[in-house]
Amino acid sequence: MPKHALSRLNRTHKLGVAGVAAAGAAALIFAAVPGADADQGKTQATAVENVKPVAFSAVGTAARAQQATIAKQADASAAKGRAEAAAAAKQAAAKKAAAKKAAAEKAAKAKAAAAAKAKAEKERKAKQAASRSAVRTAIPAAAPKPAVKTYPNNLDGWIRESLDVMAKKGIPGSYNGIYRNIIRESSGNPMAINLWDINAQNGIPSKGLLQVIDPTFKAYHVAGTSWNIYDPVANITAACNYAADKYGSMDNVNSAY
């Protein structure tokens, strides 16, 4: 066997080779001794045969021991890997649970904040409503202004408007009494003027719906009406005021008055 091949053998192998060498040397000694009989040669052969199986048995035991050690190390490494994987999974689960809990807490805080804001807004509106109610109670609302009554611009409208003014001033008269006298005096023409009677001869002609002279119109003019003698409402109201003073009411007038 080359020298460099022996250097690669481990301790067990070296012991086995040494045993074989020792057995060989013993056999050579027995062969060299004079007078050695056949039994001694037989004993030598038996010794050599017994040495060889022992050497190879030691090599197999060492290999099995090494394989067992490697298998044990592999099992330990696998167990360590499983433990590390389990720890990592546990840590990831813990992080996920913590994140979920944090999100739930954040959502709960946001919901509570929104509820608090809504409650505060509701209370603010309630206070404003109560304040407005208190102001309305302290300051009575102004009475609504009565709607302005309108009248048609014709004989019917002029008579009705005059009657409303007369009612406020306490001047008697009826629609029929006024209408009857207007038709007799002017035929319903508010611009009518008499230029031939005695009043006209005296320079104060009768004018308007109820043929009133200027002095009478001025003396019996009703406040709130026009100062224009030809104004239908002013003419009717002044004439009815004069008739009430002289005859009790325009209803009692059936001719020139």
Image: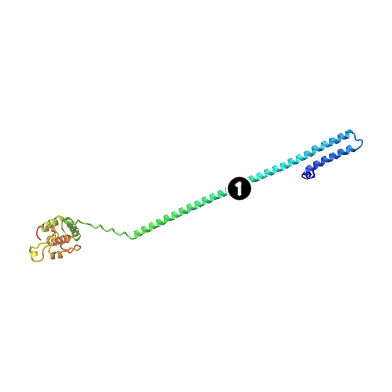
Q: Residue furthest right?
A: 35
SS type, badge 1? helix
Left or right, residue 177 beside residue 83: left
- The foreground one among 215 and 95 is 95
Residue 233 at what x, y percent from top left? 17, 60
**Disc 1 target residue:** 88
Position of the C terminus by quadrant: bottom left
Residue 169 at what x, y percent from top left? 19, 61
Decide: few, some or many residues near mark 1? Use Cα within 10 Å; few <14, some 14-19, many ≥20. Answer: few
Q: Residue at x 13, y 65 (%)?
A: 214
Q: Residue at x 70, y 43 (%)?
A: 70
Q: Residue at x 78, y 38 (%)?
A: 56
- The foreground one among 144 and 33 is 33
Q: Taking 197 as reference, is 114 above or below it?
A: above
**Count of numbered circles in the view:** 1
Residue 185 at what x, y percent from top left? 11, 58
Q: How is the image coloured?
A: rainbow
Left or right, residue 108 beside residue 215: right
- The foreground one among 86 and 131 is 86
Based on the displayed image, in which of its 4 quarters is residue 125 positioned?
Answer: bottom left
Based on the displayed image, in which of its 4 quarters is residue 52 positioned?
Answer: top right
- The foreground one among 4 and 178 is 4
Position of the N terminus by quadrant: top right
Residue 209 at what x, y percent from top left? 13, 59
Q: Residue at x 88, y 37 (%)?
A: 31
Q: Amino acid at mark 1?
A: Ala
Q: Residue furthest front?
A: 2
Based on the displayed image, in which of its 4 quarters is residue 4 positioned?
Answer: top right
